[in-house]
Image (cartoon, rainbow, N blue to C red):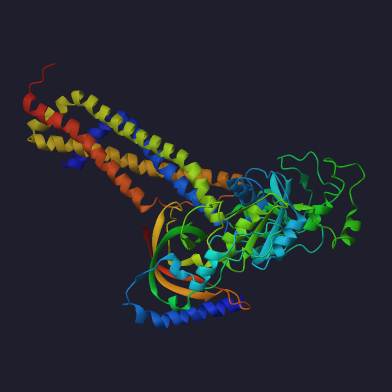
Amino acid sequence: MKHKMIHRVFVGTLLFVLLPLSAHADVREIEWVELMPEEELNAWLQESEIVDHSGFGAAEPFQSFRTMPELDGIEARIPGFVVPIETDGEGNLKEFFLVPYFGACIHVPPPPANQIIYGRLEDPIPMVNIWDAFWMEGTLNVEDISNDTAASAYTMDVTALELY
Amino acid sequence: MNLLGLAWRSLLNRRFAVLLTVCTIALSIGLLVLVEQLRSEVRQGFYRSVSGVDLIVGGRTAPVQLLLYSVFGIGDATNDISWETYTQLKALPEVDWAIPMALGDSHNGYRVLGISPAFFEHYRFGDSEHIEFESGQEFDDLFDVVIGAQVARQLDYELGDQIVLAHGSGNVSLQGHDEHPFTITGILAPTGTPVDQQLYVSLAAHRAIHIGWERGVQMPGSAIDPDVARTQAEELRPDAVTAIFLGLTARAAVFGLQRRVNEYRAEALSGIMPGITLQQLWRITGMAEQVLRVVAALVVVAGLLGMLTVLLATLGERRREMAILRANGARPWQISGLLVFEAGLIAAAGIAFGVALALSVQMVAAPWLLSEFGLHVGLTWPAAWQFGVLGLIFLAGLAVGVIPAAMAYRRTLADGMQIRT
């Protein structure tokens, strides 16, 4: 918990320093596949679909927590669906996941972790509809999510969330 | 005398009809505002009630139902989760914390939850606020109970009071756990969520009071002696829990975990993400809300038509009044203006009273919503866009006034002082 905090503060400070520099940087439109390391994409395509159903087992192999470090800090714009996670006291949207497709499609596994972006809104906005697609724009970050493994995931400090 | 004064005197002269018209419009506006206010307040109340929980796991059931019975105490669970499944889930590397809860008992109609101490540490509400104690602390002894703020207030309980829990969730207890009175050791601070409406005991205590109930009713003399139970407190645990709140180490893992929970073969489970499930709930209630909105809008139209009727009906009676005004130098457009002005006054008064009506109904309904559903409904001012709608309704009121005004304009020109009766 403490580590996370320190980490957040660190990232926050870093952002504070870097933001003015990148304020005029062009916003890059990225695609979801760009978020996935190439070798992983290849391995993933060749992988056989054997899923162990006994017990809760280990996390499925494609639950990848590997990210593309070169995407860290870029100003990006990406379309997707919103999965609300946290609201403020008034029911406004504060934190959410952006995912490439909507719905609990029960026939295929959910998107891997590096195909999910954790969005944080500085100023909460009125709750959006989860059935609508949105353009999310902001600063993309790669954040370590645990201290003992190399797991990391994408987060975004969202500046704009608009209807697709 | 100015326009306002004239209109006012004229309205006073017809006060009964005008008052009724204002009432009609006020009722319709009140309905419109109330529907919208309650809708947003209730949604807000639901969003407030759950925060920081990544996944809720329960026996296989519909997502909305699982959310309603686990968080809001609405409806009942169809199935339990075995203790083994709970321990397995809790041990998963991506699970940061787990709050198991066992339902099934009540006290004076309030739910009693068997929970682990993780509840006090990890459960959050509103803007990620933690649960705090108004007084006292967590349970120490096996037969200790912590109560929500609303329970303490409604039943007038204080720390140290002894209470008896009832088996089942009826409002009146017929079958109680009389042998095992609980002592109140903690009272939670108000949260404005269902947390206020519940009582909390340890899972061990939940187990202890159900020894002897294996056949569905309590076998006489089979209850465990409280002191014996205390010595076994370490080993006591329920065979099953009703729902589990999970917090994850990495939130992005929630989709994968949800799928594994739903596909778990050893036991039929449902895992839900609260944010998504709440929206599914809104989708269900959305239909009813739309119908209510349409009805409210139609009632507003009826109210405005009512005003038109009254204005038209009195127009005939007011020919003399108009003629006198004309004789005193009023121009036809001034008379028309007077009528539009009147309509505007009536509409404005109706809107003002309507909003006041809606707010007072909200104020009266708030305690009921709080005690029935644990939903805290605040007295908030209508949203900006609602005032926009009210403005449009006011303009519609003015437009309605134009009809009698146009008729009066033509008539005053034609009639002059000659009133043919």
Residue A156 vs B4, above or below: the answer is below
Image spot of residue B166 (x, y percent): 77, 45
- Above or below A57: residue B318: above
Q: Is residue A103 left or right of residue B167?
A: left
Front in this rendered view, residue B108 or A105: A105
- Residue B118's place in the image compared with A3, above or below, is above
Which residue shows up at 51% across the image and 43% down it? B364
Q: Is residue B182 visible?
A: no
Residue shown at 8%/24% (left/top)?
B415
**Left or right: where does residue A68 sit relative to residue B167?**
left
Q: Position of residue B108 (x, y in %)?
A: 72, 44
Provide residue B226's location: percent of width, then percent of height: 88, 55
Depth check: B394 or B90 in front? B90
Residue B288 visible in the displayed image: yes
**x, y percentage for residue B242?**
71, 51
Q: Quadrant of residue B54?
A: bottom right
Q: Nearer the viewer, residue B329 or B406?
A: B406
